[in-house]
Amino acid sequence: MAGANVNGAPLQVAREIPGDILVPILSTKSGMPNYESSLTAAEWRQIVNSAVETAVISLDPEGRVTTWSRGAQSMLGWSEAEMLGRTIECLFTEEDRRRNVFAQELEDARNHGRGLGAEGWRLRKDGSRVWGAGEVAPIMGPDGTIIGFVKILRDRTEQRANEMVVREERRALQILNRVGSQLAMGQDLHQLVQLATDAGVELTGAEFGAFFYNVVDDAGKTYMLYTLSGAPVEAFSKFPMPRNTAVFAPTFRGEGIIRSRDITKDPRYGRNAPYAGMPEGHLPVRSYLAVPVVSRAGEVLGGLFFGHAREGVFSERSERGLEGLAAQAAIAIDNARLYAAAQREIAERQRTEASLQELNATLEHKVSERTEQLKRSEEALRQAQKMEAIGQLTGGVAHDFNNLLQAITGNLEILQRHLPEESGRAQRAAAQAIAGAERAAALTQRLLAFARRQPLDPKPTHINALVTGMSDLLHRSLGELVAVEIVLGVGLWQAEIDPNGLESAILNLVLNARDAMPGGGRLTIETSNAYIDEHYAAKAVEVRPGQYVLISVSDSGTGMDEATIARAVEPFFTTKPVGLGTGLGLSQVYGFVKQSGGHLKIYSEPGQGTTVKIYLPRLVGAVDVIEETEALLPPEGEQESILVVEDDDGVRSVSVETLMDLGYRVLEAADGAMALRVLEHAGHIDLLFTDVVLPGGMTGADVAAKARELRPDIKVLFTTGYARNAIFHHGRIDKGVQLITKPFTLKQLAEKVRAVLDGMD
């Protein structure tokens, strides 16, 4: 048996005891044997085995066990019989074995007379661990050679645990003191909660942590944010915010700390749809620790949540540390909110003071600006009222004039049809009279357009295609002295407008531009999508904010001053010499655009040219494109029966005679009541041909409705020189309504009647 020299000197062998083992004798002087104090082997074993809290192990030169004390068996679990002849590598952890710690202890003992092994974890037979501290000393033979070693190992597990507690408490206090100082100095809320989250991970040894907290914005609305520590933002950003489930609710209600050794085994876990636990892709959580953060006023500000993939990571000490951290975080958040509220109040006061100063400084200017705005509004209102009054006047005149023209043209055509072919002079006179009547009809149509009384037949229209189709006509109208450029917008929206009316409007603008460039120049037509905002719409007359299709017609001509622009759309106003213009071109364009729900704007400067912009409302939604088909209509009737309802005797007479000449059987009535009597007592009637405006309280639409009740199969054709709301809504013909406008020619009437009877319109 061998023993260690308490002074660190090598042990020496005094003698060999037969039948027993070598008994080393401690030297009384450094390195010198003391033969007077020799012990027997039994005495030596008794002394060694009495040290029950210390493992004393003797080894041969190769490190194999030769003796194993009772203290070693008590501390480590193996018996002497189990360990004799084995090395003590099994006492060391896997990491220490990889680092050859035991071999290094023996080497140090050989070279330096003592191997001071570092303190560390040593393994017991049952797999548990003990914190051991000790050394290795060589056993020297009589000749001074090393014949073995003595390994002394003391159990310091309890002392180590106490040291770790003290060290952990000291570390926790250092973290709390450091974080407390940082929280006390911070004012940024998000930065404060990030500090608290990072500190919580550091305190508890968690793999990751999060702080979910409520924020109140400037508008007073509350929403939840969060900070993360130990994990990237992407690890949580794809998941919804935590809800008041059985696991999270106690924290968000401020009921206290929740700690779980394994949250997946908690009875509250996995009871909520849609995930029934952690969603796929969530960080693995077994150990779970959550603490509410409660303000001094008792308000739950949020919650600190920490997790670890291993079980049983968090302890009561973790709870105590988080309690202190949560209290510090609550104070810091309260202070940050107070600071933010104070800053908002200061900023609001500053804004109020600045606004007051600005108001005082600009009051006179604002009063002047408001007065000017009121003047502009009054002027716009007067202009609108003037245009409405002119429109009512021109619309009424046009209506009456159309009736007169219908009687004139109708009778002229009847006269022309019955004149002998050899009466050349009379034929020419009739033709010239008809041509004059047609020019008069065109003027009345322009008046109706300005008055917004013309009947429109709007269709979903591709503006780019319409403008492109007019290209040849525009080039012929402008001549060789004017260069034409057409710029079509990409992705142009559709508009629901009357295509013929729009073509007429564009042609009017082009002809005006040509007249403004007598020496030639450049004309540009552009299309694009546009948006009119509320600010612009408020300053304009009868303009709604929204999306529009914009058509711009620009010229490089003489231009106009502001006074001319202000009157440009008034009927009969013109800057052209006498005989060169009617003053109805722009009026017609203006009326058409307004009736179509659009807006017209003129930009011009003398000598710089003019741009007229037409804004047409965008057509939103799917539309059915109606294909135009050219019908070959027979000019003659097939003995169908037609009821003509017209209050004007001259117009009715012409219409009846014309239809009879075309081969139809004709009945007539002067008002709605008479028409109903005819419908009730007459035989079969194929078509009702009625004026829209009738005397006696019934409109043409009323007569048509009653006629369909009496005769469901009857066809209806309306005629009008002017109609407000009878069969139109906002100037647009109701769907399915057939109409021919006055004055109409014999050919137009023949084609329209035939088309309605044949069901081709």
Image: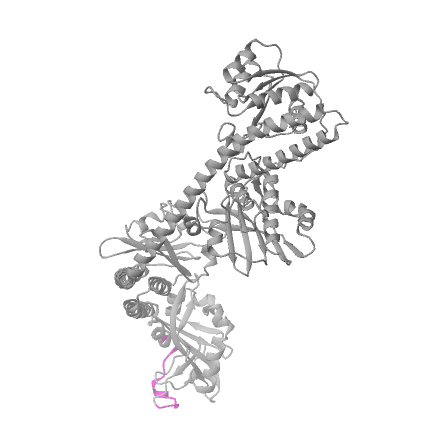
Based on the picture, tell me whether residue 748 belongs to the magenta stretch.
no
Based on the picture, tell me whether residue 33 belongs to the magenta stretch.
yes
Q: Quadrant of the N terminus?
A: bottom left
17 or 562, which lies in front?
562
Q: Answer above or below: position of 172 versus 759.
A: below
Picture coordinates of residue 555 (x, y %)?
59, 56
Residue bounds of the magenta highlight: 29-42
* Total numbered circles: 0
Residue at left 46%, top 83%? 108
Residue 568 left/right relative to 23: right
Q: Answer above or below: position of 113 versus 42.
A: below
Residue at left 55%, top 21%? 649
* Main SS, magenta residues: loop
440 or 598, which lies in front?
440
Q: Quadrant of residue 267?
A: top left
Residue 172 seen from this side: yes
Picture coordinates of residue 259 (x, y %)?
34, 54
Picture coordinates of residue 202 (x, y %)?
37, 65
Q: Answer above or below: position of 14 versus 534.
A: below
Q: Quadrant of residue 500?
A: top right
Picture coordinates of residue 323 (x, y %)?
28, 59
